[in-house]
Image: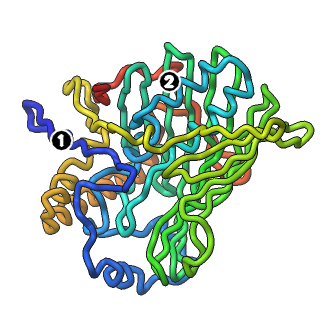
Amino acid sequence: MVTRSKDETKVVLTRPLSLDGDSEVDYRAPNLIQRLSSLFKNVRPGSDLTHFKLPPLFNFPKSHLQCYGETVYCIGSDMLSRCSLADNSVDRFTSVVAWSISTLRPPIFGVAPYNPILGETHHVSRANLNVLLEQISHHPPVSALHATDEEQNIELIWCQQCVSKFHGASVETEVRGKRQLKLLSRGETYEMNSPNLLIRFLPIPGVDWAGNVRIRCPESGLEAELRYGPKSFLGLRGSHKSVKGKIYETSTRRTLFEVNGHWDRTVTMKDINSGKLSIIYNAKDVFSGLKTPVVNDLQGVRSSESAVVWSELSQAIMSQDWEKAKEAKNALEEKQRELLRERESKGATWVPQHFCVTYSKDGGWDCSPTQQWVPPAPIVVPLS
């Protein structure tokens, strides 16, 4: 969707990724593997790809900041509200585990979103949930998310840094950072991390989420350990898009539930005491009827909004005008280099608009929002 104001400012919004990983552009070219191989032919195994620049041909029309936000506001079933509505701490915790699984999105093999520019923002509302993201660092790339629902007394505070490394036959993106879900009316805070993204070129191309996720709630004394597993290197073992794990008491390490399933299908939970099996997550419910966000207040859209910053490039990619896409991307990158040179000449340091940033001793990032509640956004997700 393209929206223009009187001064010709473009706002380009694209549909969210479906369960099948559909995009606005068909990338199923027969020579995709050859093109990817040529792209990485001069990159050494173990190299950090943080500063690696993809040509537009390998981008799909969306910023990483938008993809990050979509995991929260693009949903077919409101699993977030259920976390707060559950009557007891065990039910709330299992609801949080299910919601955490729902934040995974099917990636598309061979293409990636844009790397956000410094100060880029993304502000979208879905009903009472208001979501605001900001790129608080460019080198290294760090994104911050703040989302609030005043009606349900829910707050999300996430800080995420992606570090990609090339391993010859694969690329692994480690997603560093802390995610917090706060159920304010319950006095509970849930801390969790994210699995890593694994892109494999050979022998069987594919992309999947992999690694361990830990979810803990100090107030309830409950924890969960989830393992996301891709196929083996030869594709002969392992379970594609699988998730397995357990929910247990922190103090005694006693397992209460076993978790098993696939994040693109269903996930079940088995009560260890009773043996009862129940479905806690159904991907079809989460991904059904996803709506493309629309502009509700054109005058309220910031110039730093992702859908504005990348509008020219997104429109060129959707039109498959690769020469125009290259020009748009080069122009944007050159503008960022000019702004950096200007800041350096003045001795100025970039300060985020919506987050206060601190750095831990281990080199990690932490951020806290500058406002208690995220205001309603000029871009909204239609409910029907």
Residue at horizontal 28 percent and vertical 35 percent from the top: 293
Q: Is residue 250 above or below residue 331?
A: above
Q: Secondary structure at mark 2?
A: strand
Please state the horizontal and vertical placement of residue 139, each as a whole percent of the image: 49, 57
Q: Which residue is mark 1?
A: 1
Is residue 242 visible to the viewer in this orientation of the structure?
A: yes
The label shown at residue 359 is: none
**In this orientation, which residue lies closer to the viewer: 118 or 99?**
99
Residue position for label 2: 148
- The residue lying at 28 percent from left, 81 percent from top is 31
What amino acid is labelled 2 in the image?
Answer: Thr
Residue 274, picture quadrant: top right
- Which image quarter: residue 32? bottom left
Residue type beneath disc 1? Met
Q: Residue at x 37, y 55 (%)?
A: 20
- Give the image location of residue 296, x and y in percent: 23, 24
Colour basis = rainbow
